[in-house]
Image: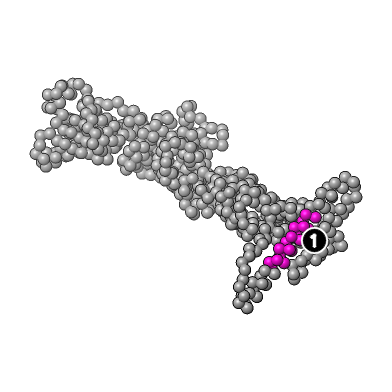
């Protein structure tokens, strides 16, 4: 325990002998500081101290007392103010920044008129009676000073009076009627039996002028207050948590929480949780009429950092999902956790909400389809992105949402470039989300010559292209029971020459034919591997049946 001797005016303490005679009592405040005081001086003004001194003398029978007081309002600072008041014969300068602390100390120590006339409690009450005539800055300063002894200011009714004065100032300077509430403890005549703040209130000082911007003039000023006092303000209005139906209060809370995320010194967000839930309920209540799709994503980013309840999060996601067709790519790029750069699960949930909505037009569905393809290309370079998550995003919209799967193929190509160590099975699984019939001829050509695409996928994609050209030009691409292709792949070159007699296309056609010939060679190699595998499998089966020893040989890989 730290023992710090606090000095008082010299006419009270005259040297060492005076210290011995006058300061016979040690008082330890909240285990932080020790004060040496005269018991008679304190007992003259404090009924509680008089009782404590009397009880301690009976218990210890000692001349010099040693008293401990815990949970003193304001700690050592508060007690020092009281001690100075007592040693100055009841004189002290009261200001808007210390009146709350002095008032709580006076109530705590029982410094009433029963003990001494014009005691500290009466002086603070007289000062507080004029709070409805204080300036806006004075009310804020007084409220801010209550932070360190919030519980006492709240239980003694001081916070409620200050909050009513604050709200009255807001109402007097606002164009809109904000709130309705009631109380029976306020010292103001207007709040004695319930009151309504409206624009019809009396005129206000010229120093306070409403702002013409969408943000109310009082938003920034209230951000100096701690979250527990803001929570008390919101509770006083009867709009806490799911009772919040006020758009302007919701916008203030969002503004307050946004600044809180940038404030240093807040290692925990728990004290903001109630405010975050209240803001979320307000957004959900106001809905799409008050908040655009982009604004809703901004709200989600702000509130998610405070750990809002599951109910609030689901409600907000439902609201966003219903208007997902209005979003842009950068809206979807919400930061993820340690498992990835972006929150992919969020996007999957939002798309599910959108798809499940009744009466979604084909136009809106295709707009979301294009958006998801852009998103896939954006998240594909993330090496922490699992194949299951990639497929979850790609397959979150139905096939009808895409006129073309070229965008999905581009995303797959980017993913394969970023993950070169994937096995053939994993690469085949990744291509599961492709609809080959909706690939353009150009995309199919790129797929066929891409060495990272498994041969089986290449063949399926090429076969699907026959539906896009006349049969006489393309033939029937299908496999026989032995797995051999029935016609020549180079016939595909004809489809690039349809209606292209101009010499300007000659060079391009030559390039295409070369690529198709390479494709033919790949298919022939595949058929050769297939025949070898069938032959080896047959030998293994015969050896196992007749008991002949089998010779191990590595089978060729289909990749």
Helix or strand or loop: what does disc 1 sit on? helix
The reply, left or right, for residue 178 in relation to residue 86 is: right
* Between 354 and 502, the one nearer to me in the picture: 502
The reply to whether residue 125 is in sight is: no
The reply, left or right, for residue 433 in relation to residue 3 is: right
* Between 172 and 436, the one nearer to me in the picture: 436
User: Which residue position holds label 1?
Assistant: 466
Q: Which residues are magenta?
A: 517-534
Q: Quadrant of the N terminus?
A: top left
Residue 43 position by quadrant: top left
The reply, left or right, for residue 458 in relation to residue 61 is: right
Residue under the point 52% across and 39% down:
176
Q: Quadrant of the C terminus?
A: bottom right
Above-or-below relation of 33 to 445: above
Q: Position of residue 502 (x, y in %)?
A: 90, 47
**Secondary structure mainly formed by the magenta segment:** helix
Residue under the point 20% across and 21% down:
10
Any magenta on residue 544? no
The reply, left or right, for residue 483 in relation to residue 246 is: right
Q: Position of residue 243 (x, y in %)?
A: 47, 50
Any magenta on residue 520? yes
């Amino acid at each position: 325990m730290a023992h710090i001797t606090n000095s008082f005016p010299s006419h009270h303490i005259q040297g060492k002998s005076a210290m011995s005679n006058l300061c016979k009592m040690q008082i330890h405040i909240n285990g932080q500081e020790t004060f040496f005081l005269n018991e008679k001086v304190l007992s003259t003004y404090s009924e509680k101290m008089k009782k404590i001194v009397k009880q301690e003398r009976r218990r210890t029978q000692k001349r010099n007392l040693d008293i401990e007081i815990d949970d003193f309002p304001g700690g050592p600072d508060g007690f020092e103010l009281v001690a100075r008041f007592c040693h100055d014969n009841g004189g002290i300068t009261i200001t808007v920044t210390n009146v709350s602390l002095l008032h709580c100390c006076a109530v705590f120590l029982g410094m009433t008129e029963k003990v001494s006339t014009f005691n500290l409690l009466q002086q603070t009450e007289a000062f507080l009676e004029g709070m409805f005539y204080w300036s806006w800055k004075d009310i804020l300063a007084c409220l801010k000073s209550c932070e360190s002894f919030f519980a006492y200011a709240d239980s003694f009714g001081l916070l409620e009076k200050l909050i009513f004065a604050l709200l009255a100032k807001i109402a007097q300077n606002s164009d809109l009627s904000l709130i309705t509430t009631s109380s029976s403890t306020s010292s103001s005549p207007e709040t004695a039996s319930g009151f309504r703040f409206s624009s019809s209130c009396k005129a206000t000082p010229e120093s306070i002028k409403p702002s013409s911007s969408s943000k109310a003039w009082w938003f920034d000023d209230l951000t100096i207050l701690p979250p527990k006092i803001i929570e008390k303000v919101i509770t006083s209005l009867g709009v806490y948590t799911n009772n919040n139906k006020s758009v302007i209060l919701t916008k203030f809370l969002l503004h307050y929480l946004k600044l809180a995320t940038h404030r240093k010194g807040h290692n925990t967000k728990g004290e903001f949780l109630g405010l975050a839930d209240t803001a979320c309920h307000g957004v959900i209540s106001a809905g799409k009429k008050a908040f655009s799709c982009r604004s809703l994503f901004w709200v989600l980013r702000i509130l998610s950092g405070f750990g809002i309840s599951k109910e609030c999060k689901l409600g907000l996601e439902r609201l966003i999902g219903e208007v997902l067709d209005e979003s842009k790519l950068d809206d979807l790029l919400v930061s993820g956790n340690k498992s990835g750069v972006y929150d992919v699960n969020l996007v999957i949930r939002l798309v599910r909400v959108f798809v499940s909505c009744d009466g979604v037009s084909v136009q809106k569905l295709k707009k979301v389809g294009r958006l998801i393809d852009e998103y896939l290309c954006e998240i594909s370079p993330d090496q922490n992105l699992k194949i299951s998550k990639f497929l979850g995003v790609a397959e979150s919209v139905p096939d009808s949402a895409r006129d073309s799967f070229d965008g999905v193929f581009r995303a797959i190509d980017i993913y394969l470039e970023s993950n070169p160590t994937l096995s053939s099975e994993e690469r085949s699984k990744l291509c599961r989300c492709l609809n080959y019939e909706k690939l353009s001829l150009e995309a199919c050509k790129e797929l066929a010559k891409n060495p990272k695409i498994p041969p089986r996928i290449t063949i399926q994609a090429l076969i699907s292209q026959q539906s896009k050209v006349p049969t006489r030009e393309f033939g029937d691409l299908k496999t026989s029971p032995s797995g051999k292709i029935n016609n020549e792949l180079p016939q595909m070159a004809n489809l690039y020459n349809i209606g292209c007699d101009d010499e300007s296309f000659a060079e391009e056609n030559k390039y295409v034919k070369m690529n198709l010939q390479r494709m033919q060679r790949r298919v022939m190699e595949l058929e050769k591997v297939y025949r070898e595998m069938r032959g080896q499998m047959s030998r293994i089966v015969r050896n196992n049946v007749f008991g002949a020893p089998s010779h191990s040989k590595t089978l060729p890989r289909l990749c």
